[in-house]
């Protein structure tokens, strides 16, 4: 085991394995061969002194240690991205012009495209993006630290103005080998509430929206089975059969299409939520922030609207 920190390319590879569930697909995404990716992953495991990925005929899955390292490294990679945005701004002679904060699901599937369209209109602008949960986004915006935020929460925190920029559907998902994957009848809210699930941390818009669905049905969620602060980690845990979870349909779209997960119907529950842009009350958006709001309201995520 080495005391030197791991290189960023290896951390990126680990995060892609968590996202895609396949070392080969992760290698393809990075534009390297699978043997090269395998060697890079082995070197990372030796450097950290941990087994991060288990490999079998079904693909590659993160170990418990791998999931923890993936969560921490995701934050490191996000900070590096922010660093490079800042460096690009300094190189062009511009300061950071637009500060944004966004919840994780929006950051993974919506905001990058919106910012890409914004750059076509404002080619010299620089964007500083903070990725956290919806509760923290609201706090940053309400305190004036961030000019514009994007959240998935069902309720609008005090001190904020908002505009809906889309809708999202939450789905109950399980591994193909889970008993619920073969049931013919939907799971009713009572049974779902009594089941320990893999969930996001408190403050997450996904968790808040799901718990509100149960509250509307007159039930309260059981104590979580596992609490994770990254969608990728939850997806890996579900696919490995750790337990059920409720996630955005856009987050698990590929997993459902490729058979790594199965959607389970929930009786009498419409698990939809609004995606909203928020800004500080009494501080109307202007310039690039106003334009980004307009872009977000009319530009769907890649792959089309959420259904």
Image (spheres, grey):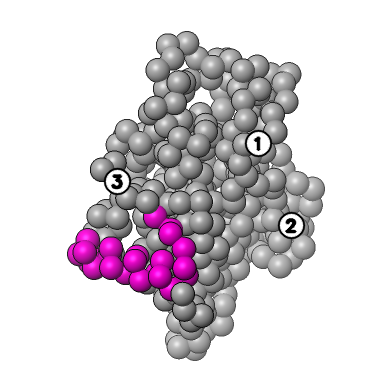
Question: Quarter holding the C terminus?
Answer: top left
In the rendered picture of this protein, how many numbered marks are placed on residues? 3
Task: Identify the residue at horizontal 59%, vertical 64% (top origin).
Answer: 130
C-alpha span from label 1 to label 2: 25 Å
The residue labelled by disc 2 is 139
**What percent of the width, then of the height, locates residue 159?**
79, 52
Is residue 127 at all visible to an observer of this figure? no
Tell which tag, 1 or 3, sits nearer the viewer.
Answer: 3
The residue labelled by disc 3 is 56
Mark 1 or mark 3: which comes first in sequence?
A: 3
Q: Quadrant of residue 72?
A: bottom right
**What percent of the width, then of the height, locates residue 278?**
65, 52
Task: Answer few, some or many: residues within 10 Å of disc 3's Cα (few below 14, many 20 plus, some between 14 and 19).
Answer: few
Of residues 37 and 145, the one drawn nearer to the viewer in this rendering: 37
- Residue range corresponding to the magenta coloring: 31-53
Task: Answer few, some or many: residues within 10 Å of disc 2's Cα (few below 14, many 20 plus, some between 14 and 19).
Answer: some
Task: Identify the residue at horizontal 45%, vertical 88% (top origin).
Answer: 91
Q: Which mark is residue 138?
A: none
Determine whether, in the image, residue 278 is placed left or right of residue 299.
right
The residue labelled by disc 1 is 224
User: Could you tell me what secondary structure mostly forms the magenta stretch?
Assistant: helix
Q: Secondary structure at mark 1?
A: loop
């Amino acid at each position: 085991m080495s005391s030197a920190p791991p290189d960023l390319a290896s951390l990126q590879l680990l995060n892609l394995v968590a996202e895609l569930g396949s070392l080969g697909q992760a290698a393809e995404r990075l534009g390297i061969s699978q043997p090269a990716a395998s060697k890079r992953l082995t070197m990372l495991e030796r450097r950290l002194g941990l087994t991060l990925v288990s490999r079998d005929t079904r693909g590659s899955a993160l170990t418990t240690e791998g999931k923890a390292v993936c969560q921490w490294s995701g934050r490191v990679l996000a900070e590096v991205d922010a660093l490079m945005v800042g460096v690009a701004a300094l190189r062009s002679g511009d300061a950071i012009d637009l500060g944004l904060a966004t919840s994780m699901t929006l950051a993974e599937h919506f905001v990058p495209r919106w910012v890409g369209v914004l750059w076509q209109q404002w080619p010299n602008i620089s964007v500083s993006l903070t990725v956290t949960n919806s509760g923290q986004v609201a706090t940053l915006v309400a305190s004036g630290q961030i000019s514009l935020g994007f959240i998935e929460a069902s309720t609008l925190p005090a001190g904020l103005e908002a505009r809906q920029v889309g809708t999202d559907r939450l789905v109950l998902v399980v591994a193909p080998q889970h008993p619920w994957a073969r049931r013919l009848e939907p799971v009713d809210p009572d049974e779902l509430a009594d089941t320990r699930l893999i969930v996001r941390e408190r403050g997450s818009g996904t968790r808040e929206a799901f718990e509100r669905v149960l509250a509307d049905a007159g039930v309260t969620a059981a104590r979580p089975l596992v609490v994770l602060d990254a969608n990728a980690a939850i997806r890996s845990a579900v696919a490995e059969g750790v337990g059920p979870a409720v996630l955005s349909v856009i987050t698990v779209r590929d997993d459902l299409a490729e058979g790594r997960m199965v959607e389970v119907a929930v009786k009498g529950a419409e698990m939809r939520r609004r995606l909203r842009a928020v800004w500080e009350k009494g501080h109307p958006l202007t310039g690039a922030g106003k334009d980004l709001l307009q872009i977000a309201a009319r530009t769907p995520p890649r792959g089309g609207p959420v259904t």
